[in-house]
Image (cartoon, coloured by chain):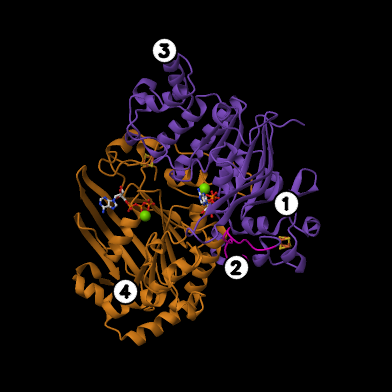
Chain colours: A orange, B purple
């Protein structure tokens, strides 16, 4: 049993999501465990295809039709919400307790609907709110993200990329959730706009006492929000460390390799790369999934999968070196 | 000094027609850009999305024809070349594109993809072409070469496809290569490896190289000089270390501040960042194009356009008040 402490607002245990495809079964989320503390940010980092968005979708229960397996435990305030049926999940959890900013959402705003209506629509449809009240909520949400409420009548094409991203964040905040899942919230934006959005997210976290799950492939950007960093590789979390430990003294060989490949601007550090490429999730390598690329791989790594274990400094790791 | 590539006040504008009767308007993607490049030198062109980088790159290799300015290549004016002369230039100047998924024709084998430029330029007989293709594959470390040559693009990973694109650019032994965001679509752990490879080949063959990117953090490792573009213009240009350690232009300074470094202290601070976003290039701001966002803007900035000028040795800046920022 995982220990539940009062400050733990969300946690997952053995969360699993497999997809069925013509090529075989894609093990996108494979028995993942995580903990999110109240008012903190848990960052999920990993390369493209490592399963980050799938993990988010598993938590938020937005699933495609071709699900092969979906199981595990997700505790929200100590209650296992995996046991909820869809109706219960929608009424009690989605938007009210947990909301999500989807990857690429700013590019899928509906071009023919006004901003205000798009923010208000889910409130009317899913929460049964009156139109007037929903629009009022929408205007408030806009103000929260630094956009003048008069923008409620505008259309997406009249807005810049940074503003669209603010709108998408406003949508997630409209029912004052406690937890917001941010899936690559700035990846389509340029650096200065990205920095402005990160400032906004920091401010909102403090003012609204939010807890974030922050998903990104960018390790430098991760450090702008993360209190804890969880590193995903091929459908698994291989290391979870506090940000201080992760950036100063990463433990897992994959974490080390990733950090070494991040160019530093202001210091002249040496950069390096991890040879090879991430595996296919239909037939991941046996044993430790990182073994074909790992400079420390031993015989056992090819055969047996390392268990998750807690080591000093509160780090959880799966690697035979520890 | 003699440059391999010398670009003067280059202008690439795109005409957009709204209707038959209304007047067309122009997107000023590249507006009076001057740059030069020595033999074997690498320069990075850094800018945000839409700042005109791709348009500049395509104009430099003459996939676009500029509406003004000059491109001098090896002492020869190539600005308006056509027909056979243009074909000659296109053999000397190659471009590598951002997207390794769409830049390779899907129904060609890798062998055929690499043979194509040789056929277009009527180079070698069958046996010689075969040797050149295998040599190129070896250069970009796609081995075993016979096996790789027989594959099709969809059988390769993103990193491998970009290696093919690099091999295709190198096979004509060009003296000038433009790489337009060559790694931005690749996995983080693969990017650095491809950049190392490009740098190695560029140095080995003494190629003059323009590395276009929005990622300032990588430039220091892969280029001698950096040019910072904003809204179709070069705002600052200097040696790579100089730009990063002593940025002068307010835009460059903001950019440097905005770029995150991997440091767990970051989460505790709010950064000072100029508001707003880059202008559209149909009607860019008057005077200095950065003035609506610049914390130091004065009256003159709205009226007069600052020219790119040498502020300290080999450090060029387009700002009316560059000297003030130099002292700090
Ligand atoms: N609906 C689906 N059906 C089948 N396979 C899927 C589906 N969605 C995702 N996958 C596969 O699952 C794996 C994980 O994908 P996911 O989108 O979760 O990765 P990610 O880490 O978010 O990547 P990115 O950084 O590119 O967003 C990939 O191999 C992907 O191709
Ligand atoms: N072929 C084209 N026709 C019309 N407009 C274009 C064309 N190519 C680019 N543009 C416009 O020119 C500007 C600069 O674009 P681009 O050179 O692609 O910038 P970057 O590569 O820095 O993102 C943008 O406003 C873009 O929409
Ligand atoms: S378990 Fe073995 S292969 Fe995997 S990361 Fe650790 S040392 Fe490397
Ligand atoms: S010219 Fe004026 S507006 Fe432009 S960067 Fe310099 S101070 Fe700022
Ligand atoms: Mg994703
Ligand atoms: Mg471009």
Q: Quadrant of the C terminus of chain B?
A: bottom right
Q: Which residues are the magenta region? A: B269-286
Estimate the x, y position of residue B144 in percent, counting from the top left. Answer: 38, 22
Mark 4 lies on residue: A77
Q: Give the side of residue B268 with respect to residue A235, left or right.
A: right
The x, y position of residue B89, in whole percent, is 58, 29
How far apart are labels 4 and 3 at the CA level? Answer: 71 Å
Q: Secondary structure at mark 2?
A: loop
Q: CA distance from mark 1 to mark 4?
A: 50 Å
Q: Are marks 4 and 3 on the same chain?
A: no
- Which quarter of the rendered picture does the N terminus of chain B lie within? top right
Dot 1 or dot 2, earlier in sequence = 1
The Cα atoms of the two marked residues, 1 and 2, are separated by 23 Å
Q: Which mark is residue B127?
A: 3
Q: Is residue A230 visible?
A: yes
Residue A178 drawn at (x, y percent): 38, 75
Give the letter of the chain under mark 1.
Answer: B
Disc marking residue B246: 1
Asked whether the beta carbons under mark 1 and mark 2 sit within 8 Å of each other, the answer is no
**Viewer-nearest of labels 1 and 2?**
2
Q: Tag 3, which chain?
A: B
Q: Is residue A229 above or below residue A176?
A: above
- Count neighbours of disc 3 (C-alpha within 10 A) and say few if under 14, some if 14 to 19, many if 20 or more: few
Distance CA(mark 4)–CA(mark 2):
38 Å
For mark 1, give the secondary structure: loop
Give the residue at mark 2. B275
Q: Residues within 10 Å of mark 1 (few under 14, many from 20)?
A: some
* Residue B275 among magenta residues: yes
Q: Calculate the distance from the C-alpha at mark 3 to the C-alpha at mark 1.
A: 53 Å
**Visible in this render: residue B260?**
no
Q: Residue at x 41, y 14 (%)?
A: B126
């Amino acid at each position: 049993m995982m220990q539940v402490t009062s400050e733990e607002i969300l946690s997952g245990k053995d969360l699993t999501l497999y997809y069925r495809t013509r090529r075989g079964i894609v093990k996108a989320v494979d028995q993942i465990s995580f903990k999110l503390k109240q008012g903190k940010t848990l960052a999920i980092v990993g390369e493209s295809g490592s399963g980050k968005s799938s993990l988010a979708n598993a938590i938020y229960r937005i699933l495609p039709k071709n699900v092969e397996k979906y199981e595990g435990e997700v505790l929200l305030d100590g209650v296992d919400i995996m046991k909820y049926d869809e109706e219960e999940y929608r009424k009690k959890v989605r938007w009210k307790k947990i909301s999500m900013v989807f990857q690429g959402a700013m590019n899928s705003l509906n071009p023919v609907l006004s901003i205000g209506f798009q923010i208000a629509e889910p409130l009317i449809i899913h929460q049964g709110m009156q139109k007037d009240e929903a629009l009022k909520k929408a205007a408030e949400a806009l103000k929260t993200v630094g956009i003048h409420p008069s923008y409620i009548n505008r259309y997406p094409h009249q807005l810049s990329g940074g503003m669209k991203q603010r709108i998408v964040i406003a949508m997630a905040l409209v029912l004052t959730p406690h937890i917001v899942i941010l899936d690559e919230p700035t990846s389509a934006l340029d650096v200065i706009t990205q920095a402005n959005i990160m400032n906004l997210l920091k401010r909102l976290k403090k003012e609204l006492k939010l807890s974030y799950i922050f998903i990104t492939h960018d390790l430098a950007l991760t450090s702008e929000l993360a209190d804890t960093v969880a590193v995903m590789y091929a459908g698994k979390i291989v290391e979870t460390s506090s940000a201080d430990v992760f950036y100063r003294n990463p433990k897992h060989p994959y974490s080390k390799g990733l950090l070494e490949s991040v160019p530093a601007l202001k210091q002249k550090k040496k950069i390096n790369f991890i040879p090879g490429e991430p595996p296919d999730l239909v037939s991941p390598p046996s044993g430790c999934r990182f073994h074909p690329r790992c400079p420390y791989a031993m015989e056992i790594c090819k055969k047996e999968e390392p268990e998750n274990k807690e080591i000093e400094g509160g780090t959880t790791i799966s690697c035979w070196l520890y | 000094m003699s440059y391999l590539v010398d670009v003067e006040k280059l202008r690439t504008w795109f005409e957009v027609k709204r209707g038959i009767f209304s007047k067309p308007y122009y997107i000023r993607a590249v507006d009076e850009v001057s740059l030069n490049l020595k033999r074997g030198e690498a320069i990075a062109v850094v800018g945000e999305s839409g700042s005109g980088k791709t348009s500049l790159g395509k104009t430099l290799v003459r996939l676009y024809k500029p509406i003004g300015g000059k491109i001098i290549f090896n002492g020869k004016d190539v600005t308006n070349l056509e027909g056979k002369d243009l074909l000659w230039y296109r053999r000397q100047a190659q471009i590598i594109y951002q997207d390794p998924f769409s830049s390779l024709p899907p129904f060609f084998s890798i062998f055929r993809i690499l043979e194509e430029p040789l056929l277009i330029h009527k180079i070698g007989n069958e046996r010689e072409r075969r040797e050149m293709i295998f040599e190129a594959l070896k250069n970009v470390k796609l081995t075993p070469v016979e096996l790789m040559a027989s594959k099709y693009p969809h059988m390769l990973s993103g990193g491998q496809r970009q290696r093919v694109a690099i091999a295709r650019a190198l096979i004509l032994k060009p003296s000038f290569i433009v790489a337009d965001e060559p790694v931005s679509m690749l996995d983080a752990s693969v990017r650095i490896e491809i950049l190392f490879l490009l740098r190695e080949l560029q140095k080995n063959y003494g190629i003059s190289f323009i590395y276009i990117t929005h990622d300032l953090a990588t430039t220091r490792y892969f280029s001698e000089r950096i040019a910072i573009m904003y809204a179709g213009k070069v705002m600052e240009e200097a040696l790579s270390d100089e730009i990063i350690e002593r940025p002068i232009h307010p835009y460059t300074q903001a950019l440097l501040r905005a770029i995150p470094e991997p440091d767990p202290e970051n989460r505790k601070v709010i950064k000072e960042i100029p508001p707003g976003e880059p202008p559209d290039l149909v009607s860019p701001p008057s005077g200095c194009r950065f003035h609506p966002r610049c914390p130091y803007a004065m009256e003159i900035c709205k009226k007069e356009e600052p020219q790119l000028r040498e502020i300290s040795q080999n450090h060029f800046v387009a700002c009316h008040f560059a000297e003030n920022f130099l002292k700090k």
